[in-house]
Image: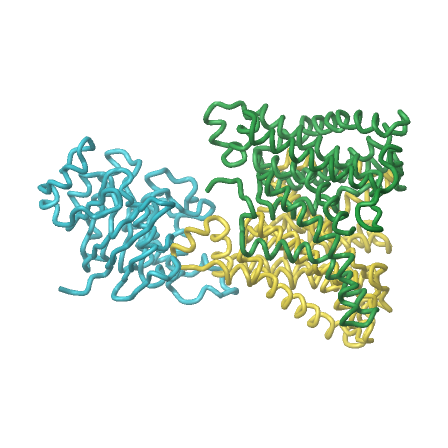
Amino acid sequence: MAEPVLRLDALHKSFGGLAVTADVSLDVRPGELHAVIGPNGAGKTTLIHQVSGTLRPDAGRVVFEGRDVTALSMARRARLGLARSFQITAVLPGFSTRENVALAVQARSGTSFRFLRAAAGERALNDAAEAALAQVGLLDRAAVAAGALSHGEKRQLELAIALAQAPRLLLLDEPLAGTGAEEAERLVALLRTLKGGPAILLVEHDMQAVFALADRITVLALGRVIATGTPDAIRADAAVREAYLGEEAIG
Amino acid sequence: MQALNGLQYGVLLFLVAAGLTLVFGVMDFINLAHGVQYMLGAYLGVSLAAATGSFWWGLLLALPAALACGLVLEWLVFRHLYRRDHLAQVLATFGVILFLNQLVKAVWGSAPLHMPIPALLDGGIEIMLGLRYPVYRIAILAAGLATAAALWLLIERTRAGALVRAGASNAPMLSALGVDTGRLFMLVFACGAMLAGFAGVMAAPILSVEPGMGDTVLILAFVVIVIGGIGSIRGAFLAALIVGLVETLGRSLLPDLLRLVMTPGPARQAGAALGSMLVYLAMALILAVRPRGLFPARAG
Amino acid sequence: MRLALAVFALLAAAPWLGFGEGHSLTLLARGMILGIAALGLWLLVGGAGLVSLGHAAMLGIGAYAVVVLDDARITDALVVVPVALAAAAIFALLTGAVALRTTGVNFIMITIAFGQMAFFTASSLALYGGDDGYTLYGRNTIGGARWLQDRLVFHYTCLALLIACFLLLRMLLASRFGRVLRAAKESPLRVEAIGFNPYPYRLLAYVVAGMMAALAGVLLANATEFVAPSYLAWQRSGELLFVVILGGLGGPQGAVVGALALVLVEELLSDLTEHWRLIMGPLLVLAVLFLPRGIAGGLAGVLRRG
């Protein structure tokens, strides 16, 4: 089996006396869409923060493409090919939709210590930006200020920005949160088109989407991994059923 | 002796900083005009004392007068700024400073005013072998410490105080819980204004009462609340004492210290410069180690 | 941009629009010089979201560079200007490297701290007048020629430099560098997530801003032929900040408009009464309450409609 794109090695993180991430290990294979699910309070977001570099784990390692990135900043990891989308959209409201994405392209296109040329006129950046926008279906809104986009459109923009980074691992933090049924369907269809490209680590609450998209699923509960496997295996797992007792039905 | 002066200056700073830190912490309002509140207290104290012929009446009447002025300012200007961003608040309150500094000059003239020390507190007492220290300065220390204690009791032990503490750590939450933040704000603001005014009156006999006297105090008060932690009375108290001591001791001792290693001329110059800088160096150091101050009140 | 063009055109024509005699020209010069310093600060506040209350120190460094060299009998602008800019750049680099590790209120306080340190240093330099200040022997020469002594030449020199700084800022803002800076202002999180570390970009902006202020300082020293430590007081930093906020943070033209407005209004009012600040203060307050986008924002609105 090829080297995993991402490997989490016994990650541990505590706040105060509470262990929010306890001995979490998992890996993401090339081209795989690996979903992380779990009831509320399972520590999914904290986990994502540790993978992206927003939080430093107390113990354990984050290995990206064979390289230990545990001590690296978020910006550094992004430059290495690890892109992330945010649950609470973090787009640049004063910039146009196109510029939001162009900036992501700019980050991987040579130095930004350039002072003479107007960045908005750089053909290469704009072309790449528009390609990413087209991929997520937002091209017709390219000139609109990002702050004026609807909630769902901002989610699409978040994806476009992440894609524009030409990532080798996509970290998606609840991309379907707060979307209606129709939008969710569109986003799922979009995510399906991404499969086979960059490896994807998807944190989601929407079970339908997860079981429709995931190649493998890891289930977290109270900060620990209680199961990892194919969707069918997870569906049949007794421990998982127990953890979700009282919560939404699985599959 | 200088140490006592430093403590006494620190106590005055605390009185001004307390209001500032509460207003900033609870209402997220940067009030540059807090310094003129202090100045108004001093001027009102002087005038009322002269009018009534008694320091004590001056003090007693100046407090509500300063409070009234503060409330007028709040109603006219500050109230409209709570929702605006900090930069707008800075600009508007600066306008208030310009106006009040000039008003004071117009009404009372530019020359420094004189406030005689009350007879009861005049003279010096011997605190140590051969060292006489002015009674009035001790009175300031005592009054300041008493006020600090009273404030502490108020904040820590009363219901109103609990609301203020909660507001300092998370104001939007408070309003979401149904607390009338409008009235709370007014209470906080009023207290702050009175404290600053009180400090002004107390300072009048020993510091010069002139237009612009609030400016130096203002910037030091900001240093105090940043060191102490925004929204924290405890922090403001400790920080104010530190700042008062560093400022006073630094300016007086440093030139002498430097003369041990330098010739008198440069020593005096370097000493003066470094002495004044010490407070800011201290602040920078503390911020490097504890970016949110000594006792940060804000949650998260 | 239209607003800026209008302002520059008016400034160019000013000597023939009734501003011809000495006093008025000096007034406009002060306004333009303040504008140059304000442009630098605008890059920080409006461009990068960094509120600095220590900008007057950079201006002061420029002014004192003139003083130090004047005392050493070096008065050629071709030497003085590069020295002033270099001194400010070094100061900005060192202080910015420290200050930019902080954010928010802490950043403001650290800039105040460094500003105060510069102020106290200047006050204690008895060699250059200490608190009393230093009177120059004369304005700077350019390659030996005493062109700057002529008021009209000085006026157009200031205007040319103001326009140059304005254009420089516009170019910087539109460049890749400016884009990162502006983005970091709106969302540092987003910028880091894409792979940018805002720190080096902000540091460079801080240095550029400092150099612009130093240029203004050199011009100010030449305009008044006198330099005092009060040029570095925190109240002066406050004034610069007010000019920038008052003018409007929408674009660099705000800094220019704000500076000229302040200088002109101050002059108008002080002619009326000795207690002109009694009117100035409330005017500032009203401006804040009713012109949320600053004077430039308000004027631009009028220009668009008209």
Q: Nearer the viewer, residue A226 or C112?
A: A226
* Image spot of residue A237 (x, y percent): 10, 42
Give the colour scheme shown.
by chain
Quarter placement of the C terminus of chain A: top left
Left or right, residue B164 beside residue C27: left
Left or right, residue C246 beside residue A68: right
Pick out the residue farthest to the front.
B129
Q: Colour of chain A?
A: cyan
Vertical placement of residue B174 versus B239, above or below: above
Count the marks: how many? 0
Q: Which chain is green?
A: B
Q: Which chain is yellow?
A: C
Q: Quadrant of residue A147?
A: top left
Residue C118 visible in this rendered orientation of the protein: yes
* Image spot of residue C150 (x, y percent): 84, 64
Residue C282 visible in this rendered orientation of the protein: no
Q: Quadrant of residue B255?
A: bottom right
Instruction: Say which residue appears at 48% left-offset and 48% top-offset.
Output: C186
Vertical placement of residue B170 versus C191, above or below: above
Quarter placement of the N terminus of chain A: bottom left
Instruction: Say which residue appears at 83% left-offset and 52% top-offset.
Output: C24
